[in-house]
Image: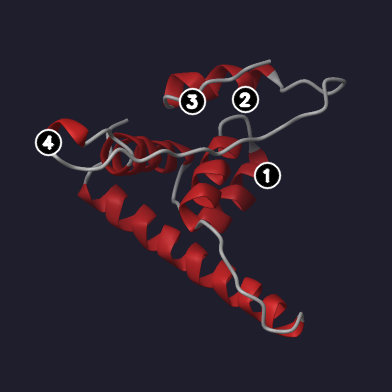
Amino acid sequence: MAANGATIASCQSGQTALAARLLDRFATSAAAAGGRNLVFSPLSIHVAVALMSGGASGDTLAEILAFAGAPTREELTAFVRESVIDRVLVDQSGAGGPTVAFACGAWTDWRRPLEPAYRDTIPKESRIQINA
């Protein structure tokens, strides 16, 4: 599914709302801990949540989509792929722009390997590599 204007607007709005909720939560926690500096990446969290949607179904999928602020898994995946991976993170060095390095990792216990629904969906939907 290609992301159209409505999909992009809906998912972008959801991504912004997620970032605001996280900032509020993290800033409140940081203030309670003595006002220390706070750094986090809403983009990384949004991408990780989109990846989690790949193998989810039922109530779990509904909860993931509500958290990410996306109408459907297909729209969330298309938004992340086309707006984030293919646009924001694309190598712009040939045109004098930046090369953005993006590292977002997840580690699993070898005794609990990724379910095939997750493992097989992630590389198809993005340029993400799974090393198992």
Q: For the residues marked 1 and 4, what is the alpha-carbon distance in whole angstroms?
A: 42 Å
Q: What x and y, as percent, mark residue 84?
A: 35, 43
Q: What x and y, as percent, mark residue 53?
A: 57, 38
Q: Residues within 10 Å of mark 3 (few under 14, many from 20)?
A: some
Determine which residue is flagged by label 1: 60
Q: For the residues marked 1 and 2, what is the alpha-carbon distance in whole angstroms?
A: 13 Å
Q: Which mark is residue 26?
A: none
Amino acid type of the residue that numbered disc 1 sits on in the rendered structure: Thr
Query: Residue 67 occupies which quadrant of the picture?
Result: bottom right
Question: At x 55% / y 51%, what residue is drawn?
Answer: 45
Quadrant of the image containing the N terminus: top left
Q: What x and y, as percent, mark residue 123?
A: 49, 20
Query: Residue 89 occupies which quadrant of the picture?
Result: top left
Q: For the residues marked 3 and 4, what is the alpha-carbon distance in whole angstroms?
A: 24 Å
Determine which residue is flagged by label 3: 128
Q: Which mark is residue 95?
A: 4
Q: Are marks 1 and 2 in contact (CB under 8 Å)?
A: no
Q: Specify which label sits upstream in the sequence, 3 or 4.
A: 4
Q: Residues within 10 Å of mark 4 (few under 14, many from 20)?
A: few
In front here: 81 or 100?
100
Amino acid type of the residue that numbered disc 3 sits on in the rendered structure: Ile
Task: Point out the frontmost of discs 3 and 1.
Answer: 3
Q: Specify which label sits upstream in the sequence, 1 or 2.
A: 1
